[in-house]
Image: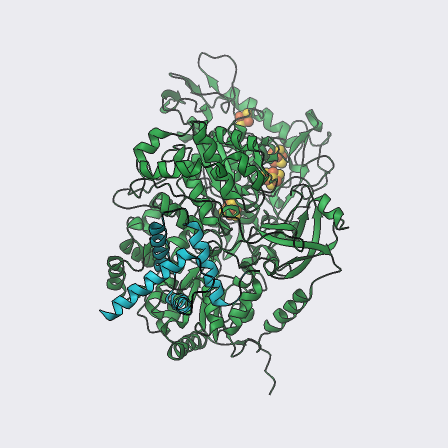
Amino acid sequence: MSPNKNSDKLVYMLNHIGKVFALKPQDQAVAEITDHLKKFWEKRMLVQIFNHVEAGGAGLDPLPKQALQNMMAQSAQTSVN
Amino acid sequence: MGLIQEIDYGTKASNATKLVTLRIDGATITVPEGTSVMRAATELGTQIPKLCASDMLDSYGSCRLCLVEIEGRAGTPASCTTPVAEGMVVHTQNAKLAKLRKGVMELYISDHPLDCLTCSANSNCELQDMAGAVGLREVRYGYDGANHLDSVKDVSNPYFQFDPAKCIVCSRCVRACAEVQGTFALTIDGSGFSSKVSPGIGEDFFSSECVSCGACVQACPTATLMEKSVIEMGQPEHSAVTTCAYCGVGCTFKAEMRGEELVRMVPYKDGKANHGHSCVKGRFAWGYATHRDRITKPMIRAKITDPWQEVSWDEAINYAASEFKRIQANYGKDSIGGITSSRCTNEETFLVQKLIRAGFGNNNVDTCARVCHSPTGYGLSKTFGTSAGTQDFDSVEDSDTILVIGANPTDGHPVFAARMKRRLREGAKLIVVDPRRTDLVHSPHVNADYHLALKPGTNVAVVNALSHAIISEGLADEDFIRDQCDWNEYTEWAEFILRPHNSPEAVEKLCGVPAQTIRDAARLYATARNGAIYYGLGVTEHSQGTSTVLAIANLAMLTGNIGRKGVGVNPLRGQNNVQGSCDMGSFPHEFPGYRHVSNASVREIFEKDWGVSLSAEPGLRIPNMLDAAMDGSFMGLYIQGEDIVQSDPDTQHIVSGLSAMECVVVQDLFLNETANYAHVFLPGCSFLEKDGTFTNAERRIQRVRKVMSPKNGYGDWEITQKLAQAMGLDMHYNHPSEIMDEVARTTNSFAGVSYDLLERMGSVQWPCNELAPEGTPIMHIGAFVRGQGQFVIADYLPTDEKTGPRFPLLLTTGRILSQYNVGAQTRRTENAQWHEEDLLEIHPHDAELRGVKDGDWVKLASRAGETSLRVKLTDRVAPGVVYTTFHHPITQANVITTDYSDWATNCPEYKVTAVQVSLSNGPSEWQTSYMAHAAESRRIGAIAAE
Ligand code: SF4
Ligand code: SF4
Ligand code: SF4
Ligand code: FES
């Protein structure tokens, strides 16, 4: 069944994106996923998925999870500066 | 303004480069070799009498009216079949020729009713004109001999009639059906006096193979084949050139009028997309514009369960604006957004996105292209550097092998299909990749060399396997790749493609197409002098839509099939202005011209022009808007000319999202399905009632011209402008041309476009700017727009929508010729006669297993929902696959489709849904309750109970 809860949906979408880039070397794959999210995801969706990562990130594949963690670290950095 | 009269040169133009000089009636003329004497004379302004000739058709030479004398040649040759020669001296008129011509006319007229005064073609009849031209004054044979005057009329076609009594058996109709349309529905039965035109043995037009394209009606020189609208209303008295509002071919028509009433639409020979041809939709199905269902007064209601109340324009606009402002005050700036329409003009789309970006202050704008061609934009811009097809339609005339993937052009893009079929009859090879046996696979005089009837959802695997076969057999065009692409990326990609899982043998197991067929098809495409790819929604509407577009682009680069006539990658766009709506900045992450909102220098261009600061963050896509509505953070939506409840997947999800919103504003011709969930209804106007431009699938920008006053009072652009003003935006255009001027000054690929240019050139293909002042028919010549072509690895990932014991069949969806998209327009025309309901196509074997017979009602169930419809048994679909259209709201085919979508663009996976089919006795519970709700919510003006 396609996922129903919104955060489940986002996890599903992210894993799908992750699989597309999975053939690339890990760094490059993470960078491509990050780039994709920055280009296309609205901030409500990002906030929601960041919250999900903070809560443990259940269901997220390693590549998208890494991309999200990088983005979160980066935005923490920007807000500190 | 008069009636636009196009010259009929009698025979087609010659493309030869060598020129020939001759003398006709004492005047000298130079024309390309191969031109007929008739055409050369017409170019000089001399009209040689003719009946069987037309410049839409190959010359035929049967009527013998166009005789001329040529010095040094014996007899009186027919000028339509005689090519010019250097130094030739031609006489078109003398006593001998006049006598011969009179004799011919006498014979024709003796078997023709003399009811000119009451004939529907009076004043527009070539026979009448020719009688005048040859000076016919008497008919020596009398009218008492055997004749056809009592023949019975065939009125079965809803749009035109066939009156054999008036037929002169010139065979123009038969040739038009064969040569122009390629349907071969008509024949001349019998011979000599008893010969007559026939649409099949014992059949009338309606039940014949005829697809009602109208080519024969246009070709007929008499009133034999005549539009019923002309018979009813009389001959038109003025006309304007405009563009069809149905599909992405973008045919040009003359809208022929009497006063403000449209009499008929006649395809325009100068139209660069259609060259004088048309299909049943654009030619005949315009009656919806005046259909009684049209809403012409604005309406509002507080709750979607209330009946509608008609109000003034000011009241409706102010109500919508105050609601949007209230919602933003309560839920934040990002709580509202809008949807642009691929049916509206470029100017209207531009305004809607401007209203949202500048007036709403966010980028929550999306378009229905989300559900059709968004993967095209993503895939082609990544690989080639532009979000558009590479060729013009004329390019197909130079193609040697045509690869059609996931497209059914004879139904979806009929006029282009007619041209493609002409090229195929000339000998081009054809490969069709489609789960269903479409008409292109096998139709009169067209047979696909290979049909790759793949299992739905395996496009990427098959296209990669084609590339695998090409590389492994040494057929890659390495010179092209080295010259124009990034070689390192190529080698990395080639290494991936050569992995065993991409071999035809491995892919055969996934897609069901024999490896040998894949290899043969690959060879045919790779070794063609010019190989062209055309694809449609069968490519994009998948969870791997973007990956397939990438794989297709890779395949074209691999074989060097880019950057000249006859080759290329060509998306066949569904709706008339899909290309334009995307160009005009309808996506939430892009400004007009496909420039990302985070690009500060681009933002600055618009901020300066619009005098507001703009958001640098991407907005919500349609499915995300609905999700956000359910979460309570998105509460207001302005929808121009779209019906997302019917056209988007997973209807129940859409309905819940819309129901959760506090203000939904729908602007449309009709109370569509989405309007059932709206609070404000702003009546829109038809393409006949406004000025603007559409951009077709070949990037061609064409004028839409107003031929009647808007029945609702305003053009759609004016309504958006009113709403923008009420939202506090400084927006004041006097005419859509000023909007195009703004597009041109803010968007480089449109920099040279203006209404003046369009007036001069008729149409132009973008990019049109200082580098290409007359536009760009073919892109990427010599170099890719992005610099070097980029090979992008796109691996096959099976969809998560899988068959299993509960849902063992795969449903795929599509459209048919007579209907358009959700059918809101075409269902309100006589086209409904060809398609009264959506049917489920099922293979006889699958039907038998389920005890289902042709015409039975069945329940179609998926994981998302269920609906009921009737079945049609056919082996067009393979066992295991079922197929339906989505033209009727009662079918609710999208109750079945899931919300799985493309990884990159969220384009929904319409083309693959696991389903089960079982016998049922009528409409499902959802259908019944939905229809009850629809009827309830369409009530207008009833006074609410106290
Ligand atoms: S309407 Fe078109 S398809 Fe039908 S008979 Fe005429 S030319 Fe052929
Ligand atoms: S129907 Fe018209 S076009 Fe066809 S043969 Fe008769 S006169 Fe000619
Ligand atoms: S629907 Fe398409 S093919 Fe048919 S007339 Fe209109 S633009 Fe042309
Ligand atoms: S027009 Fe030339 S033979 Fe008929």
Farthest-out residue, left:
A81
The quarter of the image that holds ligand 2 is top right
* Residue B666 relative to residue B331: left or right: right
Tell me where residue B4 sits by quadrant: top left
Reply above or below: B477 against B619. above
- Residue in the picture at 65% in, 61% down: B866
x, y (%) of residue B926? 65, 66
Where residue B476 sits: x, y (%)? 40, 30
Which coloring applies here?
by chain
User: Where, by quadrant of the figure, is residue B742 drawn?
Assistant: bottom left
Give B924 or B694, whichever is nearer the viewer. B924
* Visual hue assigned to chain B: green
- Expressed as whole percent of the image width and height from the top left, the position of residue B184 reads 62, 34
Whether residue B296 can be seen here: yes
Q: Nearer the viewer, residue B331 or A56?
A: A56
Q: Which residue is the extreme one toward the bottom?
A: B946
Where residue B382 sits: x, y (%)? 36, 47
Residue A43 is drawn in which quadrant? bottom left
Q: Colour of chain A?
A: cyan
In the displayed structure image, the side of residue B715 where residue B212 appears, left or right:
right
Residue B781, compared with residue B833, is above or below; it is above
* Count of number-bearing discs: 0
Which one is nearer the viewer's eye here, B520 or B29?
B520
Quarter in which the C terminus of chain B is drawn = bottom right
- Foreground residue, B688 or B413? B413
User: Quick check: B67 above or below B272?
Assistant: above
Q: Is residue B830 visible?
A: no
Residue A37, relative to residue B272: is it above or below?
Answer: below
